[in-house]
Amino acid sequence: MGPITSLAINISDEILYSASLDKTVKVWRITDFKCIETIQAHSEPINALAVADDGVLYTASDDATVRAWRRNFYTENQPHTLIITLPAKCSPVKSLTPDDDGILYGGCSDGYVHYWYKGWFSGQLQHGGALQGHTHVVMCMASVSNYVISGSADSTSRVWSRDHHQRDIGKHTIVAVLVGHRGPIRCVTAFLGRLGEDPEEEYCTICTGSLDGVLKMWRVTRTNKNLSSGGLNQNGHEYFELQ
């Protein structure tokens, strides 16, 4: 087994997935810690894994594709079957995140974030477009509600908001560009909060970890209102540093 690059878990099936630079994904049964399957997943090293709410496993690779796999419960050893291969326009895919509506986002080496959504009639994932703005590789991604967040080697994090009513055309609006790190952003996570009962007062807290050795926590609102919680303020978005 080669160097491990990513982990993902399927709680309902009690399965842990591990991806490796050796181009394989290993399937581990949590109950007895046994490897029950090795998926020959890609032709190049695998960089990221994600498990969607419906149990589909997504794998992202340096071969510039994302692949979707479904576990087959009708065979004795329950192997995974390849559902579809999604090309990412000739750029290695470094990061993945599915959102709550089943849209899949992939961050690539060329700085683009490609996304795929399920067709209304076919139910198959199809390419919806790409979000632009980063100047270097997109190293990490996260999603919460209709927010999509990317972290890049260009030391910035970008926050997009997707219009729920425009899912068929994938309308995204840039909400914030978070500037403050002095090194590549390697990991990101996010969660929602609300200041009051008004939906417009909803905010997104974003945590970014960088190779500069600093963890930052940002609060971003759709209206870009400053929040009075005592932290620093930069580019109209409040943040705290944890060192």
Image: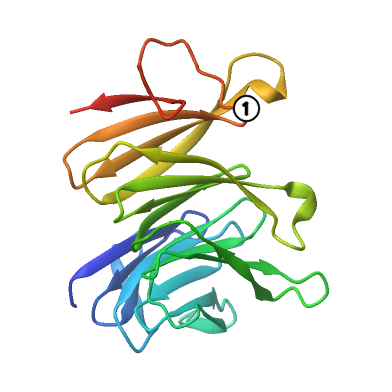
State the residue lying farthest toward the right.
Answer: 121
Determine whether the residue tagged by mark 1 lies in a helix, strand or loop: loop
Q: Identify the residue at horizontal 45%, vertical 82% (top origin).
A: 77
126 horizontally vs 219: left or right: right
Where 197 falls versus 123 (above or below)?
Answer: above
- Measured as percent of width and height from the top left, residue 182 is found at 21, 42
The answer to which of 41 and 45 lies nearer the viewer is: 45
Q: Identify the residue at horizontal 74%, vertical 73% (top origin).
A: 123
Q: Mark 1 points at which residue?
A: 223
134 horizontally vs 203: left or right: left
Image-quadrant location for residue 121? bottom right
Q: Is residue 30 visible?
A: no
Q: Is residue 121 visible?
A: yes
- Measured as percent of width and height from the top left, residue 13 is found at 50, 61
Q: Identify the residue at horizontal 62%, vertical 68% (top origin).
A: 129
Q: Identify the residue at horizontal 17%, vertical 43% (top origin).
A: 212
Where 116 falls versus 165 (above or below)?
Answer: below
The answer to which of 197 and 135 lies nearer the viewer is: 135
The answer to which of 127 and 132 lies nearer the viewer is: 132
Q: Which quarter of the image is occupied by the C terminus?
A: top left
Q: Which quarter of the image is occupied by the N terminus?
A: bottom left
49 horizontally vs 101: left or right: left
- Measured as percent of width and height from the top left, residue 105 is found at 53, 62
Q: Which scheme is used to colour this image of the protein?
A: rainbow
Where 154 falls versus 49 (above or below)?
Answer: above
- Measured as percent of width and height from the top left, residue 185 is found at 29, 49
Q: What residue type is labelled 1?
A: Thr
Image-quadrant location for residue 134? bottom left
